[in-house]
Image (cartoon, coloured by chain):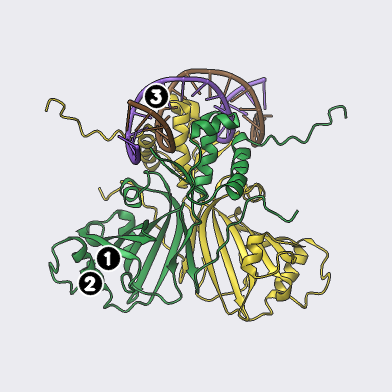
Chain colours: A green, B yellow, C brown, D purple
DNA sequence: AAGTGGTCTAGACCACGCT
DNA sequence: GCGTGGTCTAGACCACTTG
């Protein structure tokens, strides 16, 4: 046993950097404060800028930092909890909720959406675009798909287009009896249009919440909502959700 | 106006690459197939490997690819839907579910967890580690925090340690009346221990599901479960969730 | 115009899984 | 040992915001 190999688990530099930065954020910085720029930080830690950026990227993914091109890197506030599922099901647009109708069109959806709605592949559906705000910041962009059969009484052109038309579609939808709903959450990256609506760059990580609304034994509406993953904590259930910010590597020693 | 500026929105190379690769994956590859290695791919597209990797990274984030060091890059199967919230609330470990108790200790939790449990900051709680499998693959690692007050009748050392002890704690917990529960989902990155349990590298993107279980007006248990974000779609609600894989830019042709 | 983060390059070496 | 993906470097230029 001459080679009593040191139990070296060579931690990647960016990983170690992330830990150091996290501790610094916890102790020496306050929310909204701006960090030194990336070139300075990299020099200070003696690493290449790309390596430093790898650490910053993860911290932004975890909601600890916020980076904006042309401006700088700031310490992010804790994630906001946004309710996406409640005990009692309601149609979209029912409550005076945080959603804001943006637009509405009548168009043929993608094959995937048509499948979920169980409509014909070439059958146009109402597509309502909505936007969700919290604390003055956009947190989600949604596309609501509503088959014409769900809103049969919608007068041909109740409103020509735009937000007024969107509200008209939702108003009609609410006349149906809602029998249930279910949701799914998965990780995605923002498409160009969603990114613009969320004030992020294309490809930014988002939480995609897909919700089916059931009525009369059918899927009467389908919502695909993309939430900013960096700033949002999605809450389901009875009350407001849990306020946990598990500090990594923080254990009882 | 000599400078009739082309309306150039110079799309980043990696973004365009991602689009091209997505289309190739949809049309020319099948699940499980191995892609050419990164150096070849980069050469084929005439970009640096770092740029190619940026595109692959996003595709992996979206669950389209699976990369394994020393092996290669393969086409990932569609994400599996895993139920994380049902209409009727149940204690963990009640159903013959997909969870598998791994271990159990009595330890002082982090300050954040202690706060959520409303226990004293130095008060030890039962910590049960569980693992969730689907189709033979690990999909989630969970830490369950249970204050001693929730399982007062747990005989001092019902089982010394390990999985048997974990099951004993859960058994005792189920004697309580469950009054409600709520959950929150947010994006995180895998800690070293979770990463190992999930067969991923540290820092891999995960969906962190934090669930509070209420009994007798208190939080009787707290679950922090980290799901592989690349392979999982979390479903809430009545039935199994929605099977939507919105193929970007894929329309009925 | 200056300064920021975002993209990209062309290398190098390392850790890991195979055979 | 060899091939894979993972990490890292030291530059360069671009896109964007702000004074």
Tag 1 and tag 3, C-beta contact below 8 Å? no
Q: Is residue A205 above or below residue A151?
A: above
Tag 3 and tag 2, C-beta contact below 8 Å? no
Q: Residue at x 11, y 28 (%)?
A: B1
Can residue A118 be spotted in the picture? no
The x, y position of residue B204, in whole percent, is 56, 45
Position of the N terminus of chain A, as image quadrant, is: top right
Q: Is residue B24 above or below residue A157?
A: above
Q: Residue at x 26, y 50 (%)?
A: B252
The x, y position of residue A241, in whole percent, is 52, 67
Dot 1: chain letter: A
Q: Residues within 10 Å of mark 3 (few under 14, many from 20)?
A: few
Q: Residue at x 46, y 75 (%)?
A: A87
Q: Is residue B91 left or right of residue A130?
A: right
In three-dimensional space, the C-alpha distance between marks 3 and 2, rounded to whole angstroms, equals: 51 Å
Q: Are marks 3 and 2 on the same chain?
A: no
Circle 3 — which element?
loop
Q: Is residue B241 left or right of residue A177?
A: right
* Residue beneath disc 2: A151
Circle 2 — which element?
loop
Q: Is residue A55 above or below residue B142?
A: above
Dot 2: chain letter: A
Of residue B132 and residue A138, the one placed in the foreground of this image is A138
In three-dimensional space, the C-alpha distance between marks 2 and 1, rounded to whole angstroms, equals: 8 Å
Dot 3: chain letter: B
* Residue beneath disc 1: A146
Circle 1 — which element?
strand
* Residue beneath disc 3: B46
First-in-chain label (2 vs 1): 1
The x, y position of residue A53, in whole percent, is 51, 36
Q: Residues within 10 Å of mark 2 (few under 14, many from 20)?
A: many
């Amino acid at each position: 046993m001459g080679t009593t190999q040191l139990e070296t688990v060579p931690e990647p530099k960016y990983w170690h950097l992330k830990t150091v930065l996290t501790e610094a954020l916890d102790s020496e910085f306050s929310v909204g404060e701006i960090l030194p720029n990336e070139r300075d930080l990299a020099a200070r830690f003696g690493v290449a800028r790309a390596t430093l950026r790898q650490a910053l990227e993860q911290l932004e993914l975890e909601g600890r930092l916020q980076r904006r091109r042309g401006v700088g890197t700031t310490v992010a506030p804790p994630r906001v909890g946004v309710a996406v599922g409640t005990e009692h099901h309601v149609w979209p647009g029912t409550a005076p909720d945080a959603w804001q109708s943006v637009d509405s069109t009548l168009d043929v959806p993608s094959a995937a959406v048509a499948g979920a709605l169980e409509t014909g592949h070439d059958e146009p559906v109402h597509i309502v675009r909505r936007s969700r705000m919290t604390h003055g910041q956009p947190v989600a962009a949604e596309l609501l798909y509503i088959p014409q059969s769900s809103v049969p009484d919608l007068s041909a052109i109740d409103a020509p287009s735009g937000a007024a038309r969107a509200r008209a579609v939702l108003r009609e939808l609410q006349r149906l009896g809602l029998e249930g709903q279910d949701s799914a959450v998965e990780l995605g990256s923002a498409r160009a249009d969603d990114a613009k609506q969320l004030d992020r760059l294309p490809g930014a990580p988002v939480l995609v919440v897909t919700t089916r609304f059931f009525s009369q034994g059918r899927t009467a509406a389908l919502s695909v909502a993309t939430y900013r993953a960096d700033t949002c904590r999605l809450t389901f259930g009875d009350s407001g959700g849990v306020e946990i910010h598990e500090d990594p590597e923080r254990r009882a020693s």
